[in-house]
Image: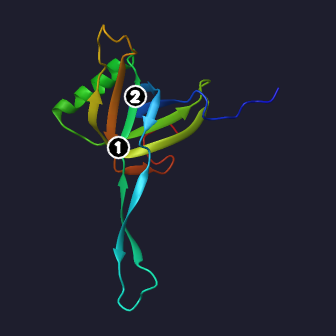
């Protein structure tokens, strides 16, 4: 029987921020970047407009999961910011259901910008979900940060 090498099946995302293990998340959105382009028109040149790269913008990363035992770890990490905000390094590890590592991303200068807890209502029995949104200053090369590479 052929071995299944499809990395998109049963992927979860394990998150560690500096020395704080935040746990596994079921979804991870926003890993990406955008190069901001400045357009310059050159006099006498009607063939094209210069496309000049200026800076890189990084989207916020949103991590979601059902409320679980690891929710207390996330809450403790968020509460640590009450005494002052400090940027940290986050490691997001994509893993299969068998815990095989698919990919690892290290984010520099991470701070939480939003946490959304579950909506609890007896009228609509749904899975209680939580979402944390992280801002960051960019990706670190593999092995440059404090993560598990």
Crowding at mark 1 (Cα within 10 Å: few <14, some 14-19, many 20+): many
Q: Nearer the viewer, residue 30 or 110?
A: 30
Q: Quadrant of residue 68?
A: top left
Q: Is residue 6 above or below residue 53?
A: above
Q: Nearer the viewer, residue 100 or 129?
A: 129
Q: Nearer the viewer, residue 105 or 142?
A: 105
Total count of labels: 2
Q: Position of residue 101 (x, y in %)?
A: 59, 34
Q: Residue at x 34, y 22 (%)?
A: 73
> Looking at the image, which residue sits at the far right?
1
Q: Position of residue 140 (x, y in %)?
A: 44, 50
- Element type at marker 1? loop
Marks 1/2 in contact by CB < 8 Å: the verdict is no
Q: Residue at x 28, y 36 (%)?
A: 112
Q: Residue at x 28, y 29 (%)?
A: 115
Tell me: 80 left or right of 130: left
> Looking at the image, which residue sits at the far bottom?
44
Q: Which residue is mark 2?
A: 64
Q: Which residue is mark 1?
A: 60
Q: Is residue 77 above or below residue 59?
A: above
Q: Quick check: can you spot residue 18?
A: no
Q: Nearer the viewer, residue 83 or 67?
A: 67
- Element type at marker 2? strand
Crowding at mark 2 (Cα within 10 Å: few <14, some 14-19, many 20+): many
């Amino acid at each position: 029987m052929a071995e299944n090498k499809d990395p998109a099946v049963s992927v979860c995302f394990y998150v560690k921020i500096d020395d704080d293990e935040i746990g596994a998340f079921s979804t991870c959105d926003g890993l990406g970047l955008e190069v901001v382009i400045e357009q310059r028109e050159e006099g006498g040149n009607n063939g094209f407009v210069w496309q000049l790269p200026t800076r890189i913008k990084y989207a916020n990363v949103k991590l979601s999961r059902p409320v679980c035992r690891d929710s207390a770890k996330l809450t403790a990490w968020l509460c640590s910011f009450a005494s002052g905000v400090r940027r940290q390094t986050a490691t997001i590890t994509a893993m299969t259901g068998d815990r095989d590592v698919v990919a690892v991303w290290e984010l520099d200068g991470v701070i939480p910008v939003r946490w959304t807890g579950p909506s609890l209502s007896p009228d609509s029995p749904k899975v209680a979900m939580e979402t944390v949104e992280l801002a960051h200053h960019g990706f670190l090369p593999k092995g440059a940060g404090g993560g598990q590479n």
